Image (cartoon, grey):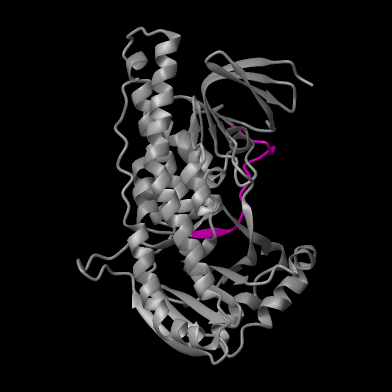
């Protein structure tokens, strides 16, 4: 056990997408942060995720958008099927109806994004094997006690530590709720090229929804979510049964779609029950308190139905860094201020961040929840209407939620 004591102006708990993006946003503005990661390595959960226009604006603000675009071709639209009959029910382009502007949608590999974010950070920013066990107040500072005995004093504490966040717990957040649905995610590789083109293929069945989306010419990400959590433990423990379960639900879908699931290696399957924060809890929760705040899944875990979980976490990082940069602006110019003054500026900046993100998070979480339960209906009439008419309206809604610009980061001279 170590009895080391450290100090850092800004500490970020969690080196996931939210934590790394937040750290890089601070770095771009000349603010040094320390990222605590409980794992001994850069851990990535899941293979890929759909990145909408709002996420690409955030990645551009971080200065890494173009390097990621090279490896991830654009997705131009969505094709929807009814799985039982194998019939195409809708085809929609990702184009804004009133302006004719095409939305930027790509399927981004999580590992590549995490490595890109990490590589842009100064050496020593991430401290691995650093599990936060308790938070203590010490005047205007927070004392962070780690599992290895280390104590860290910090002026700002940011929780990006996911759905089971210790920082959120300290702020008084309730535990994220478990949805009645589960999701299996996988990743298929085609050495010879998959030939799927540039469309997101989405399909519905009785009590389930699934989709496949190309990451590049040789790989496809897929998901399968269903409305009963009764078998999740059994499937988690047996990836082969997990794969068989998915294949048994695919009905009369085209063979090239079924082949995506067949060729996925069982080691590349992940199964989990969906979790979310009740929308009303986001409205009254303390997203920030004094010099502590949360972001990403620590703040607003949501179901996967809008594809905005990671996208909104990227937004969080940009908005939060801009707010904190204002708090540290005077010290960056050499102007002296008291500890009390600095604390009050930090407190105000985090309050500003919370105010800006609260309604955005509420909107995304509540919309995802409602859309998800509409899509998973087993009522025959509603299922018919969903298959015939919902897909175009869903895409329009997705594009509306993606029409958010977190803004650019102004370089600091610090």
Report x, y in % for residue 192: 54, 74
Residue shown at 41% from the left, 78% from the top: 390
Q: Locate residue 288 relative to residue 175 in the image: left or right.
A: left
Q: Tell me where residue 158 appears, x and y as whole percent.
A: 52, 32
Q: Is residue 109 left or right of residue 322?
A: right
Indicate whether 168 appears above or below 334: below
Q: Where are the magenta residues, as a range?
A: 36-49
Residue 38 in magenta stretch: yes
Front in this rendered view, residue 54 or 217: 54
In which quadrant of the rendered view does residue 230 lie? bottom right
Q: Mainly helix, strand or loop, the magenta region?
A: loop
In the image, is residue 218 part of the stretch drawn in magenta? no
Task: Report the front residue among 58 and 374.
Answer: 374
Name the quarter where the C terminus is drawn: top left
In x, y percent, where is residue 238? 79, 67
Please state if 132 lies on the left or on the right of 153 as rendered: right
Q: Is residue 95 visible?
A: yes
């Amino acid at each position: 056990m170590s009895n080391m004591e450290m100090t850092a102006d800004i500490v970020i708990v969690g080196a996931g997408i939210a934590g790394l993006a937040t750290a890089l946003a601070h770095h771009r503005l000349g603010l040094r942060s320390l990222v605590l990661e409980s794992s001994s390595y850069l851990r990535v959960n899941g293979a890929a995720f759909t990145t909408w226009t709002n996420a690409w604006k955030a990645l551009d603000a971080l200065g890494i958008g173009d390097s990621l675009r090279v490896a991830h071709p654009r997705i131009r639209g969505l094709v929807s099927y009814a799985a039982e009959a194998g019939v195409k029910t809708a085809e929609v382009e990702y184009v804004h109806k009133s302006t004719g502007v095409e939305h930027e949608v790509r399927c981004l590999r999580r590992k590549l994004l995490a490595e890109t974010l990490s590589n842009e950070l100064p050496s020593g920013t991430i401290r691995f094997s650093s599990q936060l066990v308790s938070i203590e107040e010490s005047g205007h500072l927070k004392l962070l006690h780690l599992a290895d005995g280390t104590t860290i004093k910090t002026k700002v504490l940011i929780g990006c530590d996911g759905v089971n966040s210790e920082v959120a717990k300290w702020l008084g957040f309730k535990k994220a709720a478990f949805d009645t649905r589960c999701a299996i995610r996988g990743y298929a590789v085609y050495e010879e090229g998959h030939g799927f083109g540039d469309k997101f293929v989405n399909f519905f069945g009785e009590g389930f929804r699934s989709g496949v989306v190309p990451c590049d010419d040789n790989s496809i990400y897929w998901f399968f979510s269903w409305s009963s959590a009764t078998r999740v433990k059994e499937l988690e423990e047996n990836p082969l049964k997990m794969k068989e379960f998915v294949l048994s639900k695919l009905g009369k879908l085209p063979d090239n779609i079924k082949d995506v699931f067949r060729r996925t290696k069982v080691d590349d399957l992940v199964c989990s029950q969906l979790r979310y924060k009740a929308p009303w809890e986001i409205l009254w929760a303390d997203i920030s308190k004094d010099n502590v705040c949360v972001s990403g899944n620590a703040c607003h875990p949501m179901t996967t139905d809008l594809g905005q979980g990671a996208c909104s976490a990227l937004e969080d990082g940009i908005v939060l860094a801009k707010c904190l940069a204002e708090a540290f602006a005077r010290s960056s110019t050499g102007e002296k201020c008291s500890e009390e003054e600095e604390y009050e500026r930090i407190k105000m900046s985090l309050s500003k961040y919370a105010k800006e993100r609260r309604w955005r998070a509420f909107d995304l979480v509540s919309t995802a929840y409602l859309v998800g339960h509409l899509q998973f209906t087993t009522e025959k009439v509603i299922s018919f209407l969903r298959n015939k008419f919902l897909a175009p309206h869903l895409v329009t809604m997705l594009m509306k939620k993606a029409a958010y610009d977190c803004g650019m980061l102004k370089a600091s001279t610090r």
